[in-house]
Image (cartoon, rainbow, N blue to C red):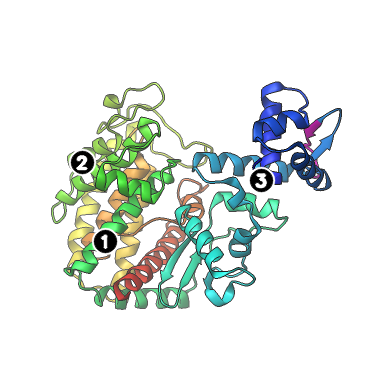
Amino acid sequence: MRKITRWDVFFTLVNLRNEKKSSVSIVEISKTLKASKKSVYNQLRILINKKLVIKADNYLPKINPRQGSIYYSLIKIYEFSTKNRVNYNLLLNKNLFAIVGSKKSTLELVDIKGIHYETFKKYLSLMLKLSFAMIIKQKPLKIRLLHHPILQDIYIVNKKVYSDKLHYFNSKDEEFYLKSISEMINSIDAKSVKFKKIDKKQRILFIAHTTQLEGNPMQFTEVKDLIENNKTFDYEKNVTRENKNMDAAMNMMEQFRGTDLTLAKIKKVHYQVQKYLDKDKIPWKKIAGKRRDVSVRISNNPKFKLSPVTQIDVLLESFIIILNNGLERLKKIPNTPLNLKKKIEFATWVHSEFQHVHPFIDGNSRTTRILFNHVLTEFSIPLTDIYFVKEYIDVTKGETSRDDKKLYSFFLHLIYDNMLRLISEMES
């Protein structure tokens, strides 16, 4: 008989009840889990004490107004773990919460209390895989905790308050970040073999995270195997296609480096982004590389303003002119702190403007992120991985009104973090 946890029993109970639409017996849970009735009974007692399960004729999951938020958070954690092929017991383990529940946003080994080093490495590996954290320095090890939507549910289950408020920067912070980014950029040998190797990894991280932002479940290591080794996975075809498409779209955009961008070139990039990916009942050939002729909206956020169909052509024409003029003007100046401010503000505008014009039926945000990185790399700023999931959504598709200053602050922080990680890997 296998060893089971209370979460094994709880989720089995929920699933069986959803199937039966009636109460569930210990025998049924035991049979499903291939565990002894005694072990199931012992775990049920724990769940009853936690007020998550109520005993009636048999046992029922309890949806209690006082415990309702915990119940629904548990269900979301279960769905998240299933989608991402992770054992839910790891997400609900006290060792994980000992790390992600830290009040600090940046952690070193000395900050991790009561966890064996090997256990810490196990959970750090999980956190990196799920974008809960990133390593910003190898020696001594330093990690930055990232905001992820599912962490709010992990906090709720642990009866703690989760803060996901983005820290916006004052002028002193901005001066420090710009100066640091400038120094790090100027210290890099972009022609070195080591930089090219790290940049290749960064590119795949960007692809994995940019599709994850759209709900794609593939993790970095899987995307790496898919792109580098053409490895097959048992996901739906569209899941792997979306990542392959991003790789092809970035290859396409790289061909345009050093040249003026035109609407035709951007449409070619979008064609690669959307290739073979239908949208609802619309065939992909009617979407890929084609300007939309219907109104669209951002899911779950009707306040996000998108351009009317009648204004798209005029706005795109203006966008292309400003884009090329800005690239030509700003590429000529060195990456001093003051000049970097201008360049990052310009890249921010490119991102914000294109996302609000929203010229295609689908694939706008993926194309926007490729454009954003194209601008940065034209300014000799290394490719920037977008891994702050919650914050990024909050200042882009989650915003209620356009605020390029907030978005600039976010990107400044993001580029700084990316540069720290790059320098750390260059030095290791």
Q: Which residue corresponds to the image point at 49% horizontal and 43% vertical from the top-left?
A: 84
Q: Quadrant of the C terminus?
A: bottom left
Was residue 61 drawn as part of the magenta stretch in this picture?
A: yes
Q: Which residues are magenta?
A: 59-66
Q: Amino acid at mark 3?
A: Lys
Residue 151 x %, y %? 59, 53
Q: Circle 3 is placed at which residue position?
A: 3
Q: Residue at x 42, y 31 (%)?
A: 296
Residue 272, x across and y down, in percent = 24, 37
| Residue 207 x/y as whole percent | 33, 49
Q: What's the distance in space between the residues labelled 2 and 3, CA to CA?
A: 60 Å
Look at the numbered disc 3 and give the secondary structure of its residue: loop
Question: Considering only order in the chain, which callout, 1 or 3, is on the residue closer to the N terminus?
Answer: 3
Q: Is residue 296 above or below residue 419?
A: above
Pinpoint residue 325: horizontal percent, then vertical percent.
Answer: 20, 56
Name above or below for residue 111 compared with residue 328: below
Q: Is residue 101 among the parts visible in the rendering?
A: yes
* Side of 42 relative to 122 (left or right): right
Disc 3 and disc 1 in contact, CB within 8 angstroms = no
User: Which residue is at the front of the view, 375 or 294?
Assistant: 375
Question: Residue 380's quadrant in the figure?
Answer: bottom left
Q: Which residue is mark 1?
A: 199
Q: Earlier in the sequence, mark 1 or mark 2?
A: 1
What amino acid type is highlighted by mark number 2? Leu
The residue tagged 2 is 263
Number of disc labels: 3
**What type is the residue that disc 1 sits on?**
Asp
What residue is rendered at 71% in x and 27% in y? 17
Closer to us: mark 3 or mark 1? 3
